Image (cartoon, rainbow, N blue to C red):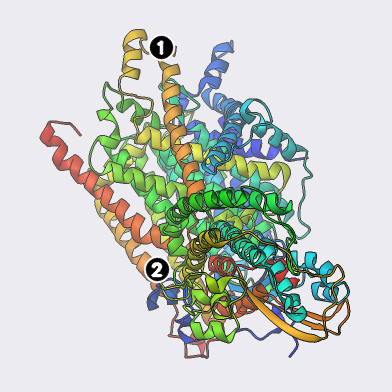
Amino acid sequence: MGLLPAPLLAATLLGAPLLVAGGQQGNFVTDLVAKLSPVEIPWPLLVLIGALLGSGFFLLLVFITPYAMLAIWAERKVGGHIQCRIGPKRVGPFGLLQSIADAIKLLVKEDTIPAGADKLLFVFAPALVLASAIAMFAAVPFAPDVWFTDLNLGVFFIVAISSLTTIGVIMAGWSSANKWSLYGAMRMAASVISYEVPLGISLLVPVLVSGTFSLREAALAQEGWGGAAWYLFRDPFVLPAFLLFYTASLAETKRAPFDLPEAESELVAGFHTEYSGMRFSFFFLEEYAAMFVVSAIGALYFLGGWAFPGLTPLVEHLFGRGWIFNAVAIGVFSAKALFLVFVMMWLRWTLPRIRIDQVMTLGYKYLTPLSLACLLGAAAWELYVVPLFGGGG
Amino acid sequence: MERIAFALFAAIAVGGGLVALFHRSIVHSAFALMGTFLGISGLFVLLGADFLAVVQLLIYVGGILVLILFGLMLTKPDPSERKLRRVLLVLAAVAVPAAILVARIASAARWAAAEGPLPDPKPAAREIGFLFLLKDAYLIPFELAAFLLTVALVGAVFLARQPHPPPPGGEDR
Amino acid sequence: MSEPARAATAPPRPVPPGAGDEHWVGDLRPGEREVLLDVKTQDMEINMGPQHPSTHGVLRVLLRADGEIVTGAQPHLGYLHRCAEKIGESVEFLQYLPYTDRYDYLAAMNNNLGYSMAVEKLMGVEVPERAQWIRTIFAELNRIGSHLISFGTYGLDIGAFTPFFYAFREREWMMALFEKVCGARLTYSYIRIGGVFNDLPEGWLEELGRFCDVFEEKWVEYNDLLSHNHIFVERTRNVGILPAEKAIAWGCTGPMLRGSGVAWDLRRDAPYSMYPRLEFDVCLGAGLKGTLGDCWDRYFVKLLEMKESIRILRQCLRQIGPGPVMADVPKTIRVPAGAGYVGVENPRGELGHYIVSDGGKISRRCRVRGPSFCNLSILGEMMPGTMLADSVAIIGSIDIVVGETDR
Amino acid sequence: MSLGAYLAVATALFVLGLAMMIARRNLLYVLMGIELILNAANLNFVAFARYAAPAGGEAALRGQVFALIVILLAVAEAAVALAIVLHAYSLFDTVRPEEPDLLRE
């Protein structure tokens, strides 16, 4: 099965520019290689090594898969409790191993390709989708000193890479030779094109406030004793921007109520109707990875990153900025991001799905102008109001 | 090592272009074009233009390619496309020697400071922003580009609409 | 004209100028409509079903769609055809009773009732009063159960998963009540020709009273959850509008007809069983959220009817008295020669049985008028001009049970 | 890497784009060919700027700024061109570039 090399290759392709763009700083894989090597290795080589090891294998196997499995378990548990059920409980304690059982089931399932399908694109599409998820994941910092790569264009890069997912979905829908899949693909394309605009513009608000595209720097700037340093509370325009961002990111990650590309009551399963086994699980992994990434952006850019009033400053005061601080930071950051993921699940199990023309109306008529207004308002605030309080810009 | 990265990206870019040119199915061509865009994005990174690389990804892959795919879905491909013209082969035969020739000329010419390893690139996003807005050098192009985008948006919407109101009942949809 | 095997052989349904203002979904203004309709496209044929999550079984609808806009729809039936009527002409009267359970399996009690009443009418049997009360109770209880499924699956069609489970929570209790009486949970055959199979167990009526109390509380919850949810309202209002004249002309019955504001309910207009002695309102769609006769109205009529059923159940609880539950009916039923039609108000509309007997043990003709079948016939009329997502909403609001359309 | 290598890639892409515009019978191919040519030009701008001013500074960014403006133009062009293609398609029912010839009559 020539499937596994495909995502790895794609991850390499994406990972290489990603890591070069990060400069020679590298990640901890490259640092380790550089330290262990007796001779000095030129940095582009390190970058390539880092791309191969760090971006591809490492992220995929060590991080995304367990996270996605946990998220899938959590989704089913949350859904269960919302629906007066219990959810999975048989496999392992609290059903925790349910996702592993599902993964094994998916892996051993027959891998079918429809007769009329465009085989090359059909096989390549899930790889592309997964690769983009990996590349997105790679740009998220978890703590001040824990990150796969510290991009100075972090959030910009994530938004750009997320468009690769769209291409992958269109590819999957088109190559499946199934009209429902095609519907899903076109809906995906339409909604992503429309919602990338409000998403990008509402993200520009914290970018404007922080003055950096780097997620890590933005999070560092929000540390402090109180929660007042969080950008969410910085001025009256960031909170609406956050809500707009969250709404648009629901559409970007095709979560309910914007799950039109895979609307099961309308399009059977949308763009992945014809997929089975391993390839299907790739789409699943991507969905949960994307959920986490957008939630992480929300946490880092709006909700103060790893700062928590009282807790992180205390830890810093007691132990300095060593590994304890980093561990606490990872915990706080994960809690915030996972809370946003939980809200996504909550919404999914609560709200009905909206229609495609309503999606377009909402995107173009409401979200885009509102996000523009937020951006203008935040800019004016930074320009005219912040100097009044003696703040520097 | 930079050579390997360069070879990889160049191969993706040119290979994508070749597939796009020669593949019979236009949808495959469009997806092959994605390879070209990605490859060029990588080359931009190697040239130290990281901001441009991300913009390339965002605009070309996320925007223009999706637009082209939309166009593909909304039009009917021409059946005569199945047979490629001979011109194609001739042009492709021209492409490779021409590229080599240009490379020879370029390396023969004495470009300033083109020798030896280059210093590492610096992040450019902020500087580009300053260039565009604060130093007056590029303010007018910037504003013109914004104006152009607005005009293009309005124009595209206007053009894509029905040229004439549909005659009552006689629309052959 | 024979029905074309594929929609392709049928001439394309012309889109009326102005794209059918009455059909048009949402409130698009003329300019927006042009943007949607201008690009020259080909219509695409899609099979919705027989394996599709929202056709409620094995219905197959052949859609012709222009992008997201449905331009034609043709329901194809018969995937669940089990020759129920033919069986009715081959087996004895009592033997046929279990088959009636299977047409609208969500309202099996009502089906039993309809068939029993038709045979009783031909036989001239007088059903004891207690049996009549029990029949009324079960008919109404099953109406609640059937509407609960309809409510839940309609939520699923629109994309909300959770109401389905809430509905099943109450339906489970209802089925437990049934189980206590007749031991079955889906196909009961409890209402027999001449009465009911056996008397109610001890304490059953008290539990029914508790059920009524709890259900009324939960009913409010359903409305909070779905009926007044903004997205749900936006998805269903002004969608699939069925004017009253059209509903009558196409022979729609039940909530489908009442959703269009036509007050027609066999329980009131052709009273049977104990309904003449009960006080209840006929619930009507009122165009509360949009135009009269849209999907929301059809949906809300069902919710109102659940509440009305609770009211009926309480009256039954007050009035029911002791007595025999079975008339004196011979083991082998022989029906005098003759023909008769009895229609009862099923959850989905009028279920009619037309039975012709030649005086033997087996009916000569056993014709069933299924409400879902008649209601479904209007699908091809309602769908064109709506969007793909609306077509799901419309099929859901027609609320078919494929077992009954195909029988 | 030498400048020549980048120029070679750019040339190859340029010729491929040109070939696509000339040889394929679909307006969308023309659109794709234009995008390829613009990309090739961008590559040239950035490569020249990089090698002309290796030390960085404003001079090194000039090429990038130009490339950015080219990308902006490409966006505008793609939107308008796609609109024209769809328009032509709905008028002439074809996407072949040589079919719409009303002016010739």
Q: Are marks 1 and 2 on the same chain?
A: no
The numbered mark at residue A383 is: none
Amino acid type assigned to the residue bearing label 2 in the image = Lys
* Residue shown at the point (53%, 84%) measured from the top left: C246
Give residue C100's quadrant in the image: bottom right
Residue extending farthest to the front is: C323
Q: CA distance from mark 1 to mark 2?
A: 60 Å
Image coordinates for residue C330, horizontal then vertical, percent? 84, 70
Amino acid type assigned to the residue bearing label 1 in the image = Gly
Q: Is residue B101 visible?
A: no
Image coordinates for residue C88, horizontal then vertical, percent? 83, 74
Q: Residues within 10 Å of mark 2 (few under 14, many from 20)?
A: some
The subunit letter for the residue under badge 2 reads C
Q: Nearer the viewer, mark 1 or mark 2?
A: 2
The numbered mark at residue A322 is: 1
Q: Secondary structure at mark 1?
A: loop
The subunit letter for the residue under badge 1 reads A
The numbered mark at residue C289 is: 2
Residue extending farthest to the left is: A388
* Residue shown at the point (87%, 77%) measured from the top left: C362
* Residue shown at the point (75%, 60%) measured from the top left: C197
Asked if residue A368 is positioned above or below residue A102 in the image, the reply reads below
